[in-house]
Image (cartoon, coloured by chain):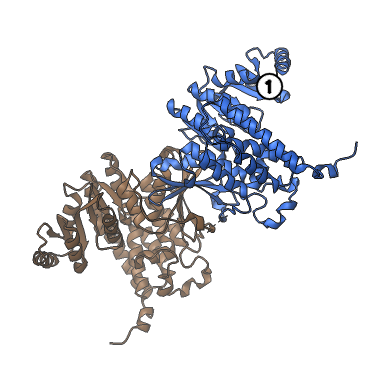
Chain colours: A brown, B blue
Amino acid sequence: MKRIAILGSTGSIGRSTLSVAESFSDRFQIVTLAAGRNLELAFEQARRWRPRLISVAAASDAEMLGSRLKSAAVMETQVVCGPTGNLRVATYPEVDFVVSAIVGVAGLEATYEAVRAGKTVGLANKECLVAAGELITAAARERARPLLPIDSEHNAVHQCLRGGRIEEVRRIWLTASGGPFLHTPKAKFAGITVEQALNHPTWKMGNRITVDSATLMNKGFEVIEACRLFNLAPEQVKVIVHPQSTIHSLVEFVDGSILAQLSVTDMRLPILYALSYPERVPSELNFSLGDLRHLDFCPPDMEKFPCLQLAYEAARAGGGKTVALNAADEVAVEAFLEGRIGFEDIPVVIEEVVGETPTGKLESIKQVLGVDQQARAGARDRVARRSRGRLPAAAITLPQT
Amino acid sequence: MKRIAILGSTGSIGRSTLSVAESFSDRFQIVTLAAGRNLELAFEQARRWRPRLISVAAASDAEMLGSRLKSAAVMETQVVCGPTGNLRVATYPEVDFVVSAIVGVAGLEATYEAVRAGKTVGLANKECLVAAGELITAAARERARPLLPIDSEHNAVHQCLRGGRIEEVRRIWLTASGGPFLHTPKAKFAGITVEQALNHPTWKMGNRITVDSATLMNKGFEVIEACRLFNLAPEQVKVIVHPQSTIHSLVEFVDGSILAQLSVTDMRLPILYALSYPERVPSELNFSLGDLRHLDFCPPDMEKFPCLQLAYEAARAGGGKTVALNAADEVAVEAFLEGRIGFEDIPVVIEEVVGETPTGKLESIKQVLGVDQQARAGARDRVARRSRGRLPAAAITLPQT
């Protein structure tokens, strides 16, 4: 029986993890949950799973949840809150495995402390590797604990890497769906609307990651994550566009053999893989290979998608650059979603902010968060300058109140 | 330094193995060779590689080769001959690794004895598994020695299997190019010529295996080989047509993940893999994944290609049935190549011969060879009956002498 903590239990990955735990209740026991701001779902999850500890964002929420659970006769669950609450969830002594799925830098410290506490960590939080990858992978190496990737691409790489030793890897290939603008000519990028950007062809995800998929910045983040997770140089991490998203990634070995991983596009599969590793557990998440007809591939267009290029440059420069890349992107995408800047402004804002961020190794999560704050401020400043005089797209359709 | 014996050094796989040994002379030493009937090439190979032992088919050939080598001042090579010579090559004490690449049942005994002598064996001889698979895999298991497949499909499976334990395999998928008649309607099969059957779309191989690829019997043999090699039920071994032959095979695990192996279509790659296993050695046999555009797939048409169906049936029945399948196929293909029977007669001959062969476990190579002889006689008999009154296709174009 593996004893699980979930950081980010009310988000998409958190809910899928609980669904996996539901299907395999003989293997996985939910011990602690960090739930964030969705109080209603936090209550439901605590009532269903009876964790030893549940953490919510605010102290007032904790109080409210505590009394609701008491009324519902849920006596075994202690309610905690805030960053300290998340830390307690992540480092709870009886936990073996921590699923790190809090969106954004909020999950950094708890994940880092989970690794330092000797937990096996399943990583679904991008920032853990993009912003604090050097720190977190070093801590995991020191304790000889595996970091198990939960997103589909790195999970695929992890599976293919079993075909050889890491020293025998020539390069890896991350597949990209290409997003909704794969076939849109560059000349039309200026007119791209929020609605168009949110229309992802293969995966249903949150708004920010969907826009990041449309700019290919998400693939850029994945390149950085892969460098950190598998200790590869940016030149060893390639991107190949594969619109069907059937092959999730590939590993090319020094002898010329390439291994690829294919499966259904369902996040429960990499979650189950990570939770069960090194075992494989029978599931019903079948891909009907017999029905497969075509797989298409093409190289990514770096000129059309400058965000991918920016990610490679940040990966090479290292230090604060990748922290700034993530922070500036989050601010820019939010501004795009609110109609304050255009689709083509996203890479411009990011490039400027990353450009003014110093390189140099970051020694603590605190330093990472400092660079993050500074980059966000820089990005907001630039967004404001670019949006001045621009009629917000959203305002056109919003009712006048 | 791995010390290598090659059974079948003058054939296609044997020559490719020597080419690999040439490129990696710091890793592989050629210790013994079994060369067969090509005396000129046997002489060249002995002069180049200076093996301790070289075996040729006939005693008279051995004498001739011996004196030529003496004249050429090759003093370290002893020349032996016949089945006994092959056995000495295969079981030579200083040999670590035996490449089994003699075409046909002639290689069975030497391969079996190599396994029993505790050698690691790389299998390129189909008959070893189709006809004597139960004996040879049992002997390898007893001595805990690996059997490393050298053909591209099973080699691919071997690589993908590293992604999990054998108990975690749901099924495997062997890819088939589909051969030259993938898109030919069944109605035109009666008119298929030898030239058309020898025109394989992706691999350059010998005549029999090329015809076996056109009938899909070769894939049927591979299904049987896979059952024996990986200890799988015939239901667990699927075939998927993939005309580009880029993915060489796939393994589907119980959790729903599928691993696939891709590479150039060059036999030196599986040879290098088998010789180096469990290491991977840097080579220049690169597949340019960045240039990949399309991969196509479709299910095999068992009605158009009854040989594949016959192979599944023989695999399920076991015992002498798969011996007869191979023997009858060899006779029928030879008759087709000589214009004595038509393309559509091949499965008919095989089905009749397999039908009259008893099932039941075979306990020795001698028993295997007995069933093989009987099946060949039966097949020749049936070929004679079918070709009676038929104008040999070849005779039409042969000059009258």
Return the chain for callout 1.
B
Query: Which residue reaches farthest bottom?
Result: A400
Whether residue B263 appears in this view of the structure is: no
| A378 to the left or right of B49 | left
Furthest toward the right, the residue is: B401
Q: Amino acid at mark 1?
A: Ala
User: Residue A195 appears in which quarter of the rendering?
Assistant: bottom left
Q: Position of residue B357 (x, y in %)?
A: 59, 37
Q: Is residue A279 left or right of residue A3?
A: right
Q: Quadrant of residue A232?
A: top left
Q: Nearer the viewer, residue B226 or A255?
A: B226
**A317 and B230: which is toward the camera:** B230
State the image coordinates of residue B194 (x, y, percent, origin top left): 74, 45
Q: Is residue B29 above or below residue A17?
A: above
Q: Quadrant of residue A266?
A: bottom left
Rendered position, B231 above or below B112: below
Residue under the point 39% across and 46% down: A158
Q: Is residue B198 left or right of residue A111?
A: right
To which residue does mark 1 refer?
Answer: B57
In this picture, is B99 found above or below A42? Answer: above
Considering the numbered disc 1 on the image, is that residue within a helix, a strand or a loop?
A: loop
At which x and y percent is residue B208? Answer: 68, 39
**Residue closest to the eye, A166 or B264:** B264
Q: Residue at x 37, y 83 (%)?
A: A397
Residue A121 position, x and y percent, is: 27, 48
